[in-house]
Amino acid sequence: MLKAGITGGIGSGKSTVCRVFEWLGVPVYYADDRAKQLMTEDAALRSEIRILFGDEAYLPDGSLNRAHIAGIVFSDADMLRQLNALVHPAVHRDGAAWHLRQTAPYTLREAALLYESGGYRLLDKMVAVTAPAELRIERVMARDGVDRSAVEARLNKQWPEEKKVEMADFVIVNDGTTPLLPQILQVHRALSLEADK
């Protein structure tokens, strides 16, 4: 079974595109969402996170203390690197097990940092969703209720969109003008054909 990845910068519209693929019957593994779940559900990962960030990494109800961890990793690049070194392998293992349970011709793994994490190396094909920077900033400000500087700070932690596009096998333009559905159908047909080989 073919394993494809789908990525794009923050606010590019990956989730919208993935919902269309799901409607077409393609299983989608949302890596960023699963990472959040694994950080609370995976006992070994919880233990490693506690060692790295202390007992205050988790709230009394067992949920992740996002504010505590964010306060550390956003000001300490080495701690962010160490957190990613714990979480990314757990997500890769979970995603691989999920993929084996699927029966469709191909699956999609959706993640914002597929290139940055090296996760793309485990996949057969890559799809990049792209949109103009200003539109992406506006989308995230509206979606998350944050100001421009907060969005730009998050943008600066990701690879430039041009680099993602350059490395992708397929590109879907989500600029609010170019029709999305024909692009998605074209990629779907190409991936289905590739999976049949």
Image: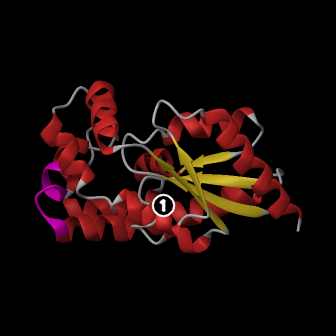
Between 114 and 188, which is closer to the camera in this rendering? 188
Q: Residues within 10 Å of mark 1 (few under 14, many from 20)?
A: some
**Picture coordinates of residue 187 (x, y %)?**
70, 50
Question: Dividing the picture into quarters, in which one does residue 61 lie?
Answer: top left
Residue 121 visible within the image? yes
Horizontal side, residue 89 vs residue 96: left or right: left
Horizontal side, residue 19 vs residue 131: left or right: right
Part of the protein shown in magenta: 70-77
Q: Quadrant for the N terminus, please.
A: bottom right
Q: Amino acid at mark 1?
A: Val
Between 95 and 7, which is closer to the camera in this rendering? 7
Query: Is 72 colored magenta in this rendering?
Result: yes
Residue 114 visible within the image? no
**Picture coordinates of residue 47 (x, y %)?**
35, 62
Question: Dividing the picture into quarters, in which one does residue 123 lie?
Answer: bottom right
SS state under label 1: helix
The residue that label 1 is drawn on is 165
**Picture coordinates of residue 43 (x, y %)?**
45, 57
